[in-house]
Each structure stands twice: as structure tokens, then as C-alpha cells.
Image (cartoon, rainbow, N blue to C red):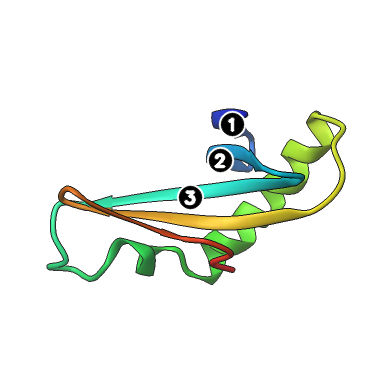
Amino acid sequence: MVDRNWRSTTGEIDLVACNDSIVVFCEIKTRASDRYGPPEAAVGRAKQRRLRLLAAEWLAAHDLHGAIRFDVAAITGVRIEVFQAAF
């Protein structure tokens, strides 16, 4: 893990990690149950757009360039599922 709960005026990045030479930005969504749909469904177009802006801000603040990836970690109860390259 490189960073967590990184904030700017645009919003917050839950988790930043490195996987080989790729910077991974991970959105974490939790739900107690699937009653209102799976947690990953909460990462819609608007949230994806905001995460892309936040990633650009984070990279500029840390003077980094290169490959990036956006993952979503969906937690339902005790089940964890990670969607690599979710968008």
C-alpha cells in the first residue's frame, strides 16, 4: 500500500497501491447484504469520472507518471471480491 484515504477538494481515494510498475487506485465499497444490489454497482459513471480526476491529482502531487489501473473492492458481509481493471 502506498496511500489510503487520500483527500483533495475533489474527493477521496480509498487506497493507492503499486503492483509491479502499475499504480493501482482502488475504490472500496461495502454492504451488509445484497438487498439493495451488489456494492460494485455503486461505482457508476459519475464516481468513475471523479476517481479519474482524483488519480490525476494524486499522480501530480507525487510527481509520478506511468501505467495506472482502477480496481474496485466489493465487500458484502464477510465476502470480499476484487475487480481488477474495473474501468
| Structural crowding at the residue carrying mark 2, measured as other residues with C-alpha within 10 Å and reported as few (<14), some (14–19) or many (≥20) | many
Q: Is disc 2 placed on a helix, strand or loop? A: strand
Q: Are marks 3 and 2 in contact (CB under 8 Å)?
A: yes
Residue 34 position in % (x across, y down): 16, 66
In screen coordinates, is 59 left or right of 63?
left
Q: Nearer the viewer, residue 4 or 54?
A: 4
The amino acid sitting under disc 2 is: Ile
Residue 31 position in % (x across, y down): 22, 53
How many numbered marks, from 0 up?
3
Q: Earlier in the sequence, mark 1 or mark 2?
A: 1
Cα distance in 3D space between marks 3 and 1: 13 Å
Residue 36 position in % (x across, y down): 18, 68
Q: Earlier in the sequence, mark 3 or mark 2?
A: 2
Question: Residue 58 bears which disc, if any?
Answer: none
Question: Residue 7 bears which disc, if any?
Answer: 1
Name the residue that disc number 3 marks: 27
Cα distance in 3D space between marks 1 and 2: 7 Å
In screen coordinates, is 21 left or right of 63?
left
User: Which residue appears at 35% of the width and 52% of the height?
Assistant: 29
| Structural crowding at the residue carrying mark 1, measured as other residues with C-alpha within 10 Å and reported as few (<14), some (14–19) or many (≥20) | few
Q: Is disc 3 placed on a helix, strand or loop? A: strand
Question: Residue 13 bears which disc, if any?
Answer: 2
The quadrant of the image that shows the N terminus is: top right
Q: Are marks 1 and 2 in contact (CB under 8 Å)?
A: yes
User: Which residue appears at 17% of the width and 48% of the height?
Assistant: 78
